[in-house]
Image: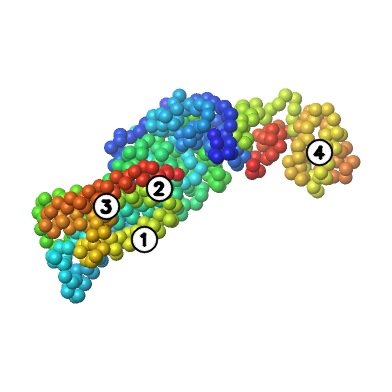
Amino acid sequence: MRYGAKTAVDDLSLTVPRGSITAVLGPNGAGKTTTLETCEGYRRPQAGTVRVLGLDPVRERRELLPRIGVMLQSGGAWSGVRADEMLRHIAALHADPVPVELLVDRLGLDECGRTPYRRLSGGQQQRLALAMAVVGRPELLFVDEPTAGMDPGARRTTWELLNELRDDGATIVLTTHYMDEAERLADLVHVIDRGRLIASGSPFELTRSKGVSTIRLVVTEPFPPTAPESLRAALGGDTEVTPINPQSLLITGPADATTLAKVSAWCEEHGVLPETLSLGQRTLEDVFLQLTGRGLEEEQ
Amino acid sequence: MTTKTFAPAPGAAPFGRMVRAQARMETRLLLRNGEQLLLAVVIPVLALVGGVVAARQLDLEFDHRAVDVLTPGVLALAVMSTAFTSLAIATGFERRYGLLKRLGASPLPRSGLLAGKIGALLVVEVLQAVVIAAVGFGLGWRPDGGVAGIALAVVGALLGTAAFASLGLALAGVLRAEATLAAANLVYLLLMMGGAVLLPRSSYGGAGAALQVLPSAALGDSLRAALIDGQLALVPLLVLGAWAVAGSVLAARFFRWE
């Protein structure tokens, strides 16, 4: 998928199992929305094949659309419409919609009252967009950054709703750049970066690696620039040291007493005071960082 | 046994139901908008009352009674305001707010969206016609064309709606929402003043003959011919048909949904 000379999505192969929640995880600009909009039939791929529920999303769009639910990243309503009115309208376009009152209640849309769409908060607009995607009882749901701009309460409500949809038999594809969202929700995670798939698996598979754990070292003063190199030399073996920010490092390797002792010794030798020294599983953020050398929240 | 609240049961509503829902929603939003109401009802009614009073005070000369000449012109103005200005502005903001994109992913096909929009236009136009005709009768309007005249007026209004709506959609499909708002209002104002819609072309002196190619003059001429003496005004109807074809080609070619 290209826009002018820039290739947004290239050589991306991914499949989504039915009845699961699949997360497409990647930083802003990775090609998540482009991928989703290609599946929704908004964009025609320049090369390659897309099949959604066995249908070509461009040529067989009319057949596909009634079966899918779409949550756009922003907008999608009349500027002067009220939230419940808009939801009722989308419901009227479907054969057997979910009762509107139920969704209004579940997603707290009654608080929108008579306020026109253009004056709703970002979080309210997001919740309405989600309700509009769900109301037609789709068998396949595409949600683009569902919780961006939501407060923590609304995020939890959204996660609960998506989990319930999956449990009731719907298939869900969501994009996100929040690793906690992918970890909490997804059965399968596709990590993409610069339009390419760089890793796939369940959150467990992605964060586990045989005999390898992580040690996170956070210090009170910024590290000298040579710190990762010198720490790696001090630890030796298969250990990897990845800088996360000026005051923290991620050490990947055997998380045993020997490694810990070496890290402490290195700290003493270089006169740095550890603020946090923690052992643990890798997070998806760590996986992404190690695969790309960049954080998820960083722009491309 | 627990029922599954969100068990998938996808499917489109029947086409007719979708179109009715779309038309109802668009009508409701048009009528809710204060500026649109000003354009749809207040300005035409003011033009009618003001025109009739001014004609009396200033002793303006028409071929017929002033109210009989002005009422068809105001009806034409009302069609123009709804089919062109209101439609263009509303559609421009529908595109801006991603509504068109979102409906593009709903079961409603584009033909259904268009049918819904046309339905909403016609409902609003009927409401306008009722109000304007009532004010006209209050001022002593006596349409002389009989049933044939009314039928011809309906044909003219439908062709005028097609011409102005296609031009309005073409405008909204090309320009940004704010530019559409400005352009649609400006064109409306210019045509109201100089487009021979309210007043017959004979009031424009030497320019009158040239004005007959404008859709505004053609719509005004066809309604005046129909409602003043029940005549079929063939040339204006052909002009409106030509504009409808040109506008549809432009809209189909240049309309962008996002």
Residue matched to label 4: A228
**In the image, are marks 2 and 3 on the same chain?**
yes
Mark 4–mark 1 Cα distance, whole angstroms, equals 66 Å
| Image location (x, y in percent) of residue A113 | 41, 52
Residue beneath label 1, please? Answer: B186
- The amino acid pointed to by label 3 is Val
Q: Nearer the viewer, residue A162 or B22?
A: B22
Above or below B103: residue B72: below
Label 3: few (<14), some (14–19) or many (≥20) C-alpha neighbours in 10 Å: many
Query: Which of labels 1 and 3 is toward the front?
Result: 1
Image position, residue A150 (x, y; %): 54, 46
Which of pointers 2 and 3 lies earlier in the amino acid sequence?
A: 3
Q: In the figure, residue A265 lies in which quadrant?
A: top right
Tag 1, which chain? B
- Residue B74 to residue A30: above or below: below
- Return the residue at label 2: B173
Check contact, mark 1 vs mark 2: CB within 8 A. Answer: no
Q: Do the numbered discs 2 and 4 sit on residues whose CB atoms are within 8 Å?
A: no
Q: Which residue is mark 3?
A: B124
Judging from the image, what secondary structure is the residue with disc 1 in? helix
Q: Which residue is found at the position 13% from the left and 59% from the top?
A: B228
Q: How many marks?
A: 4
Chain bearing tag 3 is B
